[in-house]
Amino acid sequence: RRPARPHRDLVSTRTDCCHYSAEPSVRVMQWNILAQALGEGKDGFVRCPSDALDWQERKYLILEEILTHRPDIVCLQEVDHYHDTFLPILGSLGYQGSFLAKPRSPCLDVAPNNGPDGCALFYTRARFSPMATDHLRLSATMLPTNQVAIVQTLCCRATGRQLCVAVTHLKARSGWERLRSAQGADLLHRLRTITCRAATCTVDSDASGGLSEDLPLVVCGDFNAEPSEDVYRRFLSSPLRLDSAYKLLSSDRQTEPAYTTWKIRPSGESRSTLDYIWYSHDSLSVETLLDIPSEEQIGPDRLPSYHYPSDHLSLLCDISFRERRHRLM
Ligand code: NDP
Ligand code: CA
């Protein structure tokens, strides 16, 4: 019998000093959902009961978590059930999806497997029309790597506002910090090109205006990097003027959560902050964040579990467009 899904509060991050738009905000989810083949065949989650990893059960927990919050944009990593599960189900619920497999997915080393894992990006068709989709294989100092990103440029049907959203999953494991940093540099470079690209967007109103401005950007990812790593600093100091949404959950609004993944393998327990939602802080503001479950809620066997279908926690925030006259330039 499945226990009740643990409750997570939506926390307001509004402050009196900011001017918030009257337009509806955009709800964004970031989640490494744990590839089925890796969870069963490679990860070695020794404290997770094997039936909690059964796909026929686990898929409903993943879908339940997504559909509880009904994000406008869903960014996922380690998706190895795109064509048979997420595309048909989310597609029938009003989402448009895009998937990019890793060139050489480690899922393919597991028998049986359901094909390669990769990144997936979904957005609601009612809210957004697509403008461009870029499927990127990340490079490191000119050499192609095994990591990918999807960049989706969208136009809000009601307001004509344009938004660029990216999803990525950088190289895992310690010892690969320089590769992650180089992959981050490549992604930032390519995002700069994409967000500067002249775009046209057919809208009823004139609200889009200002096409000479860079597109507001949201980058979701499992960066496999703690905030102390080079790739994190690169994102924070990039000319794209990005900030990390989840810092706003802390009392000083400057500190990342203590963990976004927490697991026990034969090698020991590992608790780390690896997942982020980056946003253009000049043109966007974060209004709400889904809080991080406490150690007690996660429980002594950590993740995944009957309660939590992945070893990574989902991140979710509501992002609004800053009014032009209040923009921080
Ligand atoms: P990564 O090192 O980026 O890791 C791939 C996955 O493994 C991630 O989803 C990661 O999850 C997970 N992972 C991280 N740590 C562990 C761990 N301790 N135990 C189990 N799983 C873990 O892999 P790459 O994309 O660079 O691919 C490497 C794999 O791909 C190799 O293992 C090999 O099987 C295969 N490969 C084969 C090639 C060939 O020519 N034969 C070439 C390239 C790759 P998370 O992000 O959640 O930490
Ligand atoms: Ca993983």
Image: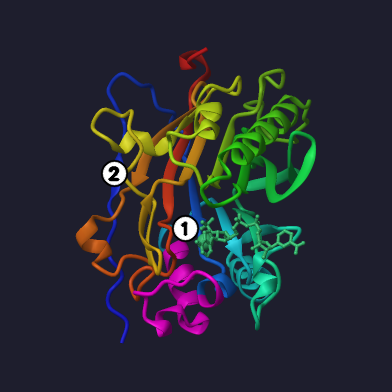
Tag 1 or tag 2, which sits nearer the N-term?
A: 2
Quarter of image, res 158: top right
Residue 158 in sight: no
Please name the residue that numbered disc 1 is placed on.
70
Q: According to the image, what is the colour scheme of the structure?
A: rainbow
Residue 11 image position (x, y, % from top left): 29, 44
Q: For this rendering, which residue is in front, 213 or 310?
A: 310
Q: For this rendering, which residue is in front, 85 or 138?
A: 138
Q: Is 65 inside the magenta-drawn segment?
A: yes
Residue type for callout 2: Val
Using residue 319 as the reference point, say whether residue 17 is left or right of it: left
Say above or below: 123 vs 210: below
Q: Is 52 inside the magenta-drawn segment?
A: yes
Neighbours of disc 1 within 10 Å: few (<14), some (14-19), many (20+): some
Would you say the magenta stretch is mainly helix, strand or loop? helix
Query: Distance of mark 2 from mark 1, alpha carbons?
Result: 16 Å
- Residue at screen point 36% across, 41% down: 288
Please name the residue that numbered disc 2 is placed on.
11
Residue 190 in sight: yes
Residue 83 image position (x, y, % from top left): 69, 71
Q: Quadrant of the N terminus?
A: bottom left
| Magenta range | 40-67
Q: For this rendering, which residue is in front, 113 or 167?
A: 113
Regarding mark 2 in the picture, which secondary structure is present there?
strand
- Residue at screen point 41% across, 85% down: 51
Quarter of image, res 64: bottom left
Residue type for callout 1: Arg
Regarding mark 1 in the picture, which secondary structure is present there?
loop
Q: Total of numbered circles in the picture?
A: 2
